[in-house]
Image (spheres, rainbow, N blue to C red):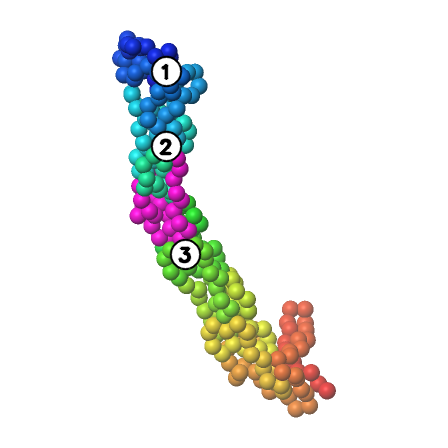
Amino acid sequence: MLGQLGAGHGEDVGGLPGQMGDRLKTVDLGAGDCPEHSAPGDLDRCTCFQGFWEGESSCNACAPGSFGAEPGASSCTACAAGTFNSETGSTLCTGCAAGTYGAAQGANSSAGCLPCSRGSFSSEGQSVCSPCEIGTYAADPGQSICDFCAPGAYGGAAGVSTCSECSAGSFSSSPGRLRCDACTMGTYGSSAGQSRCSACPAGTFGAANGSTSPDSCAACAAGSFSPAGVCVCVCVSVCLCVCVCVKP
């Protein structure tokens, strides 16, 4: 607190160094004679406003990079990491924009907010950027959100800047996939990055998963047939299944 509110003495109050009266003139309660940036407060004392700190005989504005949230403070508080303040006498700090981060306390300008690197993102007011989750990516610096991997691709690790294409013989049909699935029997995937597999033509069948070529589709034997992409599996023993065409 600052000066003692009194009846308007003509001399200083307080005889020891550090007492308010020896540096600050006495204050007339009726006149409200408090120092600049203060007002009468509790216990008949002058109280500095928010954004200022109490000195020996005056109220001093908080410097850039700091703030004063409460009236009557004896010091200002440094802006937390992820925030900044470029003005004097501020009562709060501003959060770094989404897509950036501020690692240091007491930043006095937005220059203290740095863009997130590729493969990471941030919301407003963050001190660190977060890695993109599995199945997502951030191709550019300074992203506030990560993008889903497109169909035909996958994101197998966190914090990536690109997604990986599904290899030939596999596919992913929806966005944000963590892995690709093998083409099932009766289908094949002849190129990388496919969102679906191609069906073996009618009159043929595919006996293996993950086929990469239409050459893997075998012709039905004489006296049998198969619709396109349909494979009927018949178990010939408990542990062995083979794929055959359906006889008419």
Few, some or many residues within 10 Å of mark 2 (<14, 14–19, 20+)? many
Amino acid type indicated by mark 1: Asp
Q: In the picture, residue 49 is in which quadrant? A: top left
Q: Residues under labels 1 and 2: Cα distance?
A: 25 Å
Q: Position of residue 204 (x, y in %)?
A: 61, 85
* Amino acid under disc 2: Gly
Q: How far apart are marks 3 and 1 (CA)?
A: 58 Å
Whichever of labels 1 and 2 marks the residue nearer the N terminus, that label is: 1
Q: Quadrant of the C terminus?
A: bottom right
Residue for point 49% across, 78% down: 190
Spot occupied by residue 160 in the image (x, y as percentages of width and height)? 41, 59
Is residue 14 shown left or right of residue 211?
A: left
How many labels were placed on the picture?
Answer: 3
Q: Which residue is tagged 2?
A: 51
- Tell me the element at label 1: strand
Where residue 28 is drawn, which disc sits there? 1
Question: In terms of depth relative to the viewer, which is nearer, 9 or 164?
Answer: 9
Nearer to us in this view, 141 or 201: 141
Q: Nearer the viewer, mark 1 or mark 2?
A: 1
Task: For mark 2, give the secondary structure.
Answer: loop
Bounds of the magenta segment: 91-116
The answer to if 110 sits in the magenta stretch is yes
Q: Is residue 19 visible?
A: no
Q: Which mark is residue 143?
A: 3
**Farthest front residue?**
31
